[in-house]
């Protein structure tokens, strides 16, 4: 279970890193444009880049908050383990309901099609 959580934390950290690198790169481009005497088209491009920078900063902050929650809150890690990795607690029963695929013209599905089945592969404990 620890391996899956580390992988998710690593992905979130890398995403935050790439966003930060992108913001820094865009910031450098804005400084180059602002250093010259921009004409009207460049002013529009500058405003667009500033908006994009703000959007990326908001996204980076959200990713950082998600990483921090994952590191510090047990229930967040448990939610990820259950929802993304299919982990169950010892003693829990897992029921998998397979949808009825046959056509019965709107009638109620036969009892055997509605019965819960066990998964084909054993679940992690």
Image (cartoon, rainbow, N blue to C red):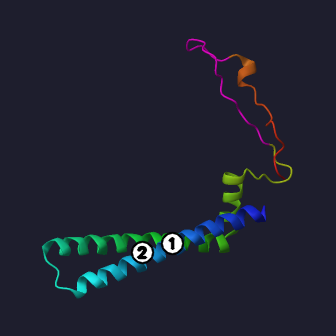
Q: Distance between the residues labelled 2 and 1?
A: 11 Å
Residue nearer the viewer, 50 or 21: 21
Q: Which residue is drawn at 69% across and 64% down?
A: 7
Q: Position of residue 54 (x, y in %)?
A: 36, 74
Residue nearer the viewer, 70 or 91: 70
Is 40 positioned to the left or the right of 26 in the image? left
Q: Position of residue 124 (x, y in %)?
A: 82, 51
Instruction: Pick out the residue farthest to the bottom.
Output: 35
- Badge 2 vs badge 1, beta-carbon distance below 8 Å: no
The span shown in magenta is 94-109
Residue 55's image quarter? bottom left
Q: Relative to residue 1, is residue 20 depicted above or below?
A: below
Q: Which residue is drawn at 66% across and 18% down?
A: 109
Asked if residue 65 is among those painted magenta in the image, a careful observer would answer: no
Q: Name the residue under label 1.
A: 18
Task: Point out the frontmost of discs 2 and 1.
Answer: 1
Q: Which residue is drawn at 29% across and 84% down?
A: 32
Q: Name the residue under label 2.
A: 57
Q: Is the magenta stretch mostly helix, strand or loop?
A: loop
Residue 119's image quarter? top right
- Disc 1 packing (10 Å; few <14; some 14–19; many ≥20): few
- Name the quadrant of the N terminus: bottom right
Which SS class for mark 1? helix
């Amino acid at each position: 279970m620890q391996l899956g959580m580390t992988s998710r934390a690593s992905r979130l950290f890398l995403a935050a890193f790439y966003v930060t690198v992108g913001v820094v790169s865009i910031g450098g481009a804005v400084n180059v444009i602002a250093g010259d005497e921009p004409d009207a088209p460049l002013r529009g491009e500058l405003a667009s880049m500033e908006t994009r920078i703000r959007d990326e900063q908001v996204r980076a902050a959200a990713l950082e908050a998600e990483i921090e929650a994952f590191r510090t809150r047990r229930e967040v890690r448990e939610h990820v383990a259950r929802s993304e990795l299919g982990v169950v607690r010892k003693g829990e029963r897992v029921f998998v309901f397979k949808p009825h695929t046959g056509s019965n013209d709107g009638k109620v599905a036969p009892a055997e099609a509605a019965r819960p089945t066990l998964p084909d592969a054993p679940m992690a404990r």
